[in-house]
Image: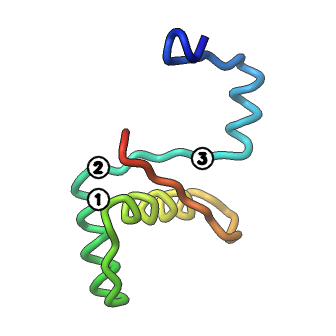
Amino acid sequence: ALRRDKRFALSPGAHAALKKEFSAYTVNDAETTGTIARIYAETGEILDPHTAVGAAAAEHYLAQSETREPVVTLSTAHP
């Protein structure tokens, strides 16, 4: 179905299981550029836009989470 329709559907159980292990966040252009500017001001490091999206998403996650475990972020060139 994925090859034919370019999409697939998850069962409610599969979706619930994935949500236990993964989180997803959206970051708009203003947040992206703001993250680039803030990280540069704080550290002198220049983030590319994709990395800035991942960093902002991680910050959103940590702000809403009780965990302080390491966070791995992924970002792609497509929304």
Sequence-wise first label, 3 or 1:
3
Q: Which residue is mark 3?
A: 23
Cα gap from disc 3 to disc 1, whole angstroms: 18 Å
In the rendered view, does 79 fall on the left or right side of 15?
left
Residues 70 and 51: in front is 51
Name which residue type carries label 1.
Glu
Q: Which residue is mark 2?
A: 28
Name which residue type carries label 3.
Ser
Q: Mark 2 and 1 residues: CB-CB less than 8 Å, in contact?
A: yes
**Where residue 30 appears, x then y in whole percent?**
22, 57
Name which residue type carries label 2.
Asn
**Where residue 75 appears, x then y in whole percent?**
46, 53
Considering the numbered disc 2 on the image, is that residue within a helix, a strand or a loop?
Answer: loop
- Res 16 → quadrant: top right
Cα gap from disc 3 to disc 2, whole angstroms: 17 Å
**Identity of the residue drawn at 75% across and 25% down:** 14
Q: Which residue is mark 1?
A: 31
Q: Where does the C terminus fall, quadrant-wise?
A: top left
**Crowding at mark 3 (Cα within 10 Å: few <14, some 14-19, many 20+):** few
Q: Is residue 3 above or below residue 16?
A: above
